[in-house]
Amino acid sequence: MRDGYVARWRGVEYDASPDGAHVRLYSPEPGEGFVEVADGRYRRGVLFGEIEDFRYVRTTCSWRGEPFLVLGEFGSWLRLEYTGGDASVAHRLGLEPYDAGVYQIWVPRGEAENVTEVRL
């Protein structure tokens, strides 16, 4: 499940993060100019002008008929954040208050429907 920036550079899409005039690219594999920053995680900085495409990606779904963002996954579980904006629905669904007006819950992956990656 993705929630963050992605960039296409030299025809390959990478997880990315903007850094001023540069973009940091992240790869699970070593490559030319990539430096290992953690086990199985490599980083390379490139100029923003060299990037072929740059987007923010979010994963959305529905659970029990209501709209959610997928924030993360752990094993067969998904961490969801309610986006419907109705506190009474959040309470009816048994969602956990995370912050003012923000409700989240862990659900089995199989219960999430219409899981879709959205490129912004």
Image: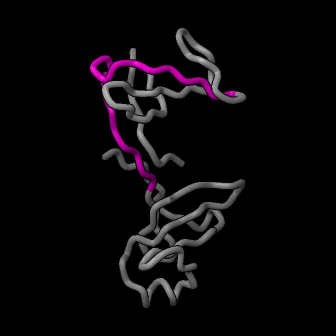
Q: Is residue 92 left or right of residue 108?
A: left
- Which residues, given as a range, are shown in magenta? 40-59
Relative height, residue 32 to residue 12 (above, below)? above
Is residue 70 inside the magenta stretch?
no
Q: Nearer the viewer, residue 77 or 85?
A: 85
x and y percentages locating residue 29 in the rendered image: 62, 21
- The picture places residue 86, in percent across and down from the top left corner, at 38, 84
User: Residue 84, image x and y in percent?
Assistant: 37, 75
Name the image quarter holding residue 46: top left
Q: Is residue 79 above or below residue 50?
A: below
Return the residue nearer the eye: 102 or 60: 102
Magenta segment, principal secondary structure?
strand
> For the point 34% across and 19% down, which residue is it?
47
Q: Residue at x 53, y 74 (%)?
A: 98
Farthest residue to the top: give it.
Answer: 32
Residue 53 is a magenta residue: yes
Residue at x 48%, y 75% (from the top left corner) = 99
- Say left or right for 72 vs 58: right
